Image: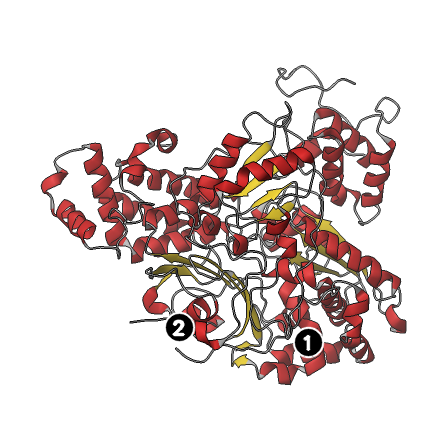
């Protein structure tokens, strides 16, 4: 089956799609195995909808009609059911996107520290894509990493705090397939609480080439103009501040 | 300022020890001993310990965990335990650190809680963005299964438990417990009508206990210390320690474990270093972006559930977002409202329309199309959202926006007036409001409407890009 898009007009005369016939719906063997493994995890097979769609998206690049149909065929549900699910969740793509994704968090904590400028910079730098393939740059809602604000999730790998100066290297790392900004990866960061660790521990090893996630630029660019990068404020992954009482003496005059 | 905060570290103790995410290191540090101790007790005795600890849910609502467990019906039936690891409240990132670095702690707590609740099937619903953390949980789960901690007849106790790490796919609303259940059932994450409450009819219509990551991760400690001993930490109605995520305009953003009841100032200034030099706290969200904002004068409020409630806000998920005086309150309100507009599932009219219109009205202020009367309308929109929806997503916008309008009314009015002037509308120049606005402009850094010395919030910026603002107006 050749890939199809969504832009063809809907045929109102046609009966709604039924559960796809396994005889006429070829499904890649790996995908079938993965979806069936997910289904086995739950008392109700429909619970596997999210992991199954995520798996199909990894194969097809987005929740394309083929991806939906194959998932529906294995799960024995209608394509419409899965489309209703896919259209609800931000990480499931309902239109074609590039294989590499950069989610820039533009929620409040990151914006206070310059995320809107960062997003604009990434958007601009990624305009031409990588080697002709578009990059999926999105302004994302809070990614849960406000401690490294402003930050981005690059194919699932959290990096921050980022400045606009980091953007070229970030894109270069995506292009070359090497770990993205290893020094700024969240995985390496120690906890902020100065009293948590009773001794000095080394930083965590650099991680982690996550699977290509996905996403799409359907969120309108947020207005830039909110917050600015804080001066001299790159604590770095070790966030080294002395766990001494002295710094608690802020002046409150 | 008082002495530095050195709260006992129950959750964060040596959390960066290499290999803590493996069973080997975790067990060397006494991991799974609490599970063995709990399985030697009756489920009722474990439940008594949880009740005695006074532990309140760490996800946002602050409901007593022991009581919640006891709501589940007794008797032999399929009961479910769901760990809410969706952590999508803006400003919150505590569970992320726990799951990534100490996943076995959560798994152990979850097994003990399932024993107390009599639940045999459990799920960890983790947000899809947390790839690293979900991978850590998956790896830990394999180890726990191999060791016989998860599965049939755990350690010969007769208690069986299945556990699945379920990855979400990006939706704030799935952190709401009934939305989470629908999502876990493979549907769109729409919240459900309550009652029936999940304790009676939750996942697959079965009795379901839903707890936050931090809550469950605390359970092994409670078993180890004893509930009564744990309850001595913190203050009377807010026992124990709490992970606090501090972010925004502070010098050392990050997660801190504090004993509940310490002054908020000690967290924001003492631990997180306060705003950058020369800046003052303008307002702060004490419990995620859903909590009503407090001002600098509230910094001495003790950080616990009831004190923050009395101060007109809430502890929520324990996420402090600090906004300093370089930022206009309108921008904070706009970011907040836009987030909830994006995340509203659309099921209930007050939330779907209320979030949308709030954003539009804020945009009108920004481009100079609003009048001071619009503030009253906006405040009344917020009032009509609260309590009128199936879930609290709408409230979660209405509470902070309502509090901003109430507490920064002057600034909003001045912004309205200034934006109108710069747009050249009407004869407002001679009005009292315009003079007031002028006064505010001259008042210095405290009000931010003024041209900010750092230049990051120049007044003209808003009127300058009407294209993006006008869309919905």
Question: In the rendered image of this protein, does residue B43 appear above or below residue A206?
Answer: below
Residue B92 placement (x, y as % from top left): 54, 57
Do the residues bearing badges 2 and 1 touch, measured as CB atoms within 8 Å?
no
Residue A223 location (% of width, % of height): 41, 37
Q: Is residue A79 left or right of residue B284?
A: right
Q: Disc 1 sits on a residue from what chain? A: B
Q: Inspect this view and state whether residue B377 appears.
A: yes
Q: Nearer the viewer, residue A27 or B136?
A: B136
Return the residue at label 1: B221
Residue shown at the point (80%, 49%) measured from the top left? A42
Q: Residue at x 53, y 78 (%)?
A: B6
**Is residue B209 in sight in this rendering?**
no
Which of these two is toward me, A38 or A242? A242
Measured along the vertical axis of the image, is residue A73 above or below residue B260?
above
Q: How is the image coloured?
A: secondary structure
Q: Nearer the viewer, residue B232 or B256?
A: B256
Q: Quadrant of residue A102?
A: top right
Q: CA distance from mark 2 to mark 1?
A: 28 Å
Q: Is residue B241 above or below residue A237?
A: below
Q: Quadrant of residue B169?
A: top right
According to the picture, the residue beneath numbered tag 2 turns out to be B301
Q: Which secondary structure, mark 1?
A: helix
Position of the N terminus of chain A, as image quadrant, is top right
Which of the two labelled residues, at mark 2 and mark 1, occupies the earlier sequence position?
1
Q: Nearer the viewer, residue A212 or A29?
A: A212
Identify the residue shown where x is 57% and y is 52%: A144
Q: Are marks 2 and 1 on the same chain?
A: yes
Residue B403 percent location from the top left of the image: 35, 57
């Amino acid at each position: 089956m050749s890939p199809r898009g969504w832009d063809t007009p809907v045929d109102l005369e046609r009966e709604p799609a039924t559960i796809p016939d396994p005889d006429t719906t070829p499904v890649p063997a790996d995908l079938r195995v993965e979806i069936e493994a997910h289904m086995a995890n739950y008392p109700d097979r429909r619970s596997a909808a999210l992991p199954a769609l995520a798996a199909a998206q990894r194969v097809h690049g987005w929740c394309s009609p083929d991806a939906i149909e194959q998932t529906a065929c294995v799960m024995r549900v209608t394509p419409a059911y899965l489309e209703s699910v896919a259209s609800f969740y931000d990480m499931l793509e309902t239109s074609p996107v590039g294989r590499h994704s950069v989610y820039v968090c533009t929620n409040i904590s990151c914006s206070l520290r310059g995320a809107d400028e960062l997003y604009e910079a990434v958007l601009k730098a990624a305009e031409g894509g990588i080697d002709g393939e578009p990059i999926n740059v999105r302004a994302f809602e809070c990614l849960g990493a406000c401690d490294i604000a402003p930050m981005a999730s690059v194919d699932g790998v959290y990096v921050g705090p980022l400045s606009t100066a980091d953007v070229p290297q970030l894109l270069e790392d995506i292009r070359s397939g090497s770990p993205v900004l290893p020094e700024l990866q969240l995985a390496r960061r120690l906890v902020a609480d100065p009293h948590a660790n009773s001794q000095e521990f080394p930083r965590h090893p650099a991680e982690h080439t996550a699977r290509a996630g996905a996403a799409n630029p359907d969120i309108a660019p947020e207005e830039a103009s909110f917050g600015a990068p804080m001066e001299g404020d790159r604590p770095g992954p070790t966030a080294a501040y002395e766990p001494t009482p002295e710094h608690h003496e802020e002046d409150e005059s | 300022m008082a002495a530095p905060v050195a709260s006992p570290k129950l959750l964060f103790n040596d959390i960066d020890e290499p290999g803590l995410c493996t069973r080997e290191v975790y067990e060397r540090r006494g991991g799974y001993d609490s599970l063995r101790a709990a399985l030697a007790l009756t489920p009722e005795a474990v439940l008594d310990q949880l009740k005695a600890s006074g532990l309140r849910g760490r996800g946002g609502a602050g409901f007593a965990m022991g009581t919640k467990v006891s709501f589940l019906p007794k008797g032999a039936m399929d009961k479910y335990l769901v760990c809410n690891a969706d952590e999508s409240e803006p400003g919150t990132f505590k569970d992320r650190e726990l799951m990534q670095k100490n996943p076995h702690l959560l798994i152990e707590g979850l097994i003990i809680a399932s024993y107390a609740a009599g639940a045999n099937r459990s799920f960890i619903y983790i947000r899809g963005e947390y790839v690293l953390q979900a991978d850590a949980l998956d790896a830990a789960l394999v180890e726990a299964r191999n060791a016989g901690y998860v599965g049939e007849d755990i350690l010969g106790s007769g208690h069986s438990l299945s556990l699945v790490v379920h990855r979400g796919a990006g939706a704030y609303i799935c952190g709401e417990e009934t939305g989470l259940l629908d999502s876990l059932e493979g549907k769109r994450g729409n919240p459900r009508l309550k009652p029936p409450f999940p304790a009676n009819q939750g996942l697959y219509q079965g009795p379901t206990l839903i707890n936050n990551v931090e809550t469950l991760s605390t359970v092994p400690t409670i078993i180890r210390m004893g509930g009564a001993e744990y309850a001595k930490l913190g203050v009377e109605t807010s026992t124990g320690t709490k992970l606090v995520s501090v972010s925004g305009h502070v010098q050392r953003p990050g997660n801190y474990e504090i004993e509940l009841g310490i002054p908020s100032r000690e967290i924001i200034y003492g631990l997180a270093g306060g705003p950058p030099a020369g800046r003052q706290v303008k307002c702060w969200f004490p419990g995620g972006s859903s909590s009503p904002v407090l001002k600098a004068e509230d910094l001495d409020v003790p950080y616990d559930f009831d004190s923050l409630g009395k101060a007109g806000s809430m502890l929520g998920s324990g996420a402090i977002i600090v906004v300093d005086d370089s930022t206009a309150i309108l921008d904070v309100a706009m970011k907040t409202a836009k987030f909830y507009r994006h995340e509203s599932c659309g099921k209930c009219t007050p939330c779907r329309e209320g979030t949308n219109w709030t954003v539009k009205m804020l945009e009108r202020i920004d481009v100079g199309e609003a009048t001071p009367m619009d503030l009253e309308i906006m405040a009344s929109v917020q009032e009509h959202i609260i309590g009128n929806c199936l879930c609290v997503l709408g409230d979660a916008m209405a509470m902070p926006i309502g509090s901003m309008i109430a507490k920064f009314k002057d600034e909003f009015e001045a912004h309205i007036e200034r934006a109108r002037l710069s747009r050249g509308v009407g004869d407002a120049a001679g009005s009292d409001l315009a003079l007031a606005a002028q006064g505010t402009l001259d008042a210095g850094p405290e009000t931010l409407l003024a041209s900010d010395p750092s230049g990051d919030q120049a007044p003209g910026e808003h009127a300058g890009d009407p294209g993006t603002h006008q869309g919905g107006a």
